[in-house]
Image (spheres, helix red, strand yellow):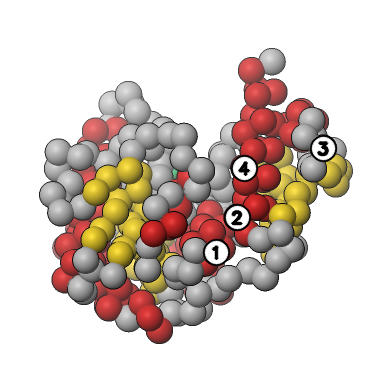
């Protein structure tokens, strides 16, 4: 059994603001260490549950945060960018996916560092008319390759969204959000237990978690922050303009729709250089 662990940073216990998650800021090294510690708990749990191999995909910002030298030495590490599946790179060869340090979708009230894929660019993202966040987009990508997301950790609002969208996936609430930039973190001893026990149970039961393959055609609709993002994204002829800030793309399946959407989003971001 092959396990992919995708690790973001906003949902790590103790992280309370953007400053904590940005390379070069005074507290960044503290929180990348905590991010690596949470990752190690998940790696240990996955092997305890019978995993033959574990791949960790660093999924935050520049995707060079997890400390390789401190990471459990049984796990492989994907770090850096560019990678076609972004946060789900490695799902191509996984039987179960674990998400650590995740966060609620953009615009969620009282949710830690809520955003979707790109905080500076995306206001809302829909999958076939359903408002979604990174967890739901990633679940569709993993499902394309036949793997379910079996476990997600982060704040209480994320857990609510996962409960409403990914039946069978276990969650761990490692902190409670008071505001986007203010959290009440669980005691570290509780965080460690929730992750260690939760991931092990989730991976052990992975075969019982439904793989939610999205039947094609699949449409992603993205409302950008600025009309310029949409304007530039529409240079691609397969991108349709819905309104001033909103575009949509349709693919034969989740993977094709993702490639179109991700490409359009990245193209749209070039307007910020102007
Ligand atoms: Zn992140």
Q: Nearer the viewer, mark 4 or mark 1?
A: 1
Element type at marker 1?
A: helix
- Of the image marks 3 and 2, the number of the one nearer the N terminus: 3
**Distance of label 1 from label 3 (alpha carbons):** 25 Å
Residue linked to disc 2: 255
Q: Position of residue 165 (x, y in %)?
A: 56, 72
Image region (quadrant) for ligand 1: top left
Q: Residue at x 63, y 59 (%)?
A: 254
The C terminus: image quadrant: top right
Quick check: can you spot residue 154? no
- Of the image marks 4 and 1, the number of the one nearer the N terminus: 1
Residue linked to disc 3: 237
The answer to whether residue 245 is left or right of residue 161 is right
Labels 2 & 1 near each other (Cβ < 8 A): yes
In the image, residue 7 above or below residue 241: below
The answer to whether residue 268 is left or right of residue 148 is right
Say which quarter of the image contains residue 63: top left
**Distance of label 3 from label 4 (alpha carbons):** 15 Å
Tag 3: Cα neighbours inside 10 Å, few (<14), some, or many (≥20)? Answer: few
Tag 2: Cα neighbours inside 10 Å, few (<14), some, or many (≥20)? Answer: many
Q: Position of residue 260 (x, y in %)?
A: 68, 45
Residue linked to disc 1: 144
Report whether the residue tagged 1 is closer than 8 Å to ligand 1. no
The answer to whether residue 157 is left or right of residue 51 is right
Name the disc covering residue 274, or none.
none
Element type at marker 2?
A: helix
- Of the image marks 2 and 1, the number of the one nearer the N terminus: 1
């Amino acid at each position: 059994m092959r396990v992919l662990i995708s690790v973001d940073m906003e949902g790590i216990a103790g992280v309370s603001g953007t400053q904590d998650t940005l390379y070069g800021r005074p507290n960044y090294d503290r929180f990348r260490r905590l991010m690596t510690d949470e990752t190690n708990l998940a790696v240990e749990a996955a092997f305890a549950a019978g995993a033959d191999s574990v791949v960790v995909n660093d999924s935050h910002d520049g995707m060079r945060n997890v400390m390789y030298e401190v990471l459990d030495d049984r796990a492989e590490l994907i770090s850096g960018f560019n990678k076609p599946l972004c946060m789900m790179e490695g799902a191509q060869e996984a039987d179960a996916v674990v998400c650590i340090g995740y966060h609620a979708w953009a615009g969620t009230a009282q949710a830690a560092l809520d955003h979707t894929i790109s905080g500076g660019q995306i206001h809302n993202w829909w999958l076939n008319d359903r408002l979604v966040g990174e967890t739901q987009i990633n679940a569709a990508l993993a499902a394309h390759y036949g793997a379910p997301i079996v476990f997600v950790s982060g704040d209480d609002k994320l857990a609510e969204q996962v409960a409403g969208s990914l039946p069978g996936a276990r969650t761990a609430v490692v902190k409670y959000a008071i505001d986007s930039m203010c959290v009440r973190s669980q005691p570290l001893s509780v965080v460690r237990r929730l992750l260690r026990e939760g991931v092990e149970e989730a991976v052990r039961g992975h075969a019982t978690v439904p793989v939610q393959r999205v039947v094609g055609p699949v449409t992603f609709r993205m409302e950008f922050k600025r009309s310029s993002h949409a304007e530039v994204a529409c240079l691609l002829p397969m991108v349709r303009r819905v309104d001033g800030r909103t575009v949509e793309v349709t693919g034969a399946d989740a993977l094709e729709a993702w490639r179109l959407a991700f490409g359009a989003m990245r193209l749209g971001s070039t307007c910020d250089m102007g």
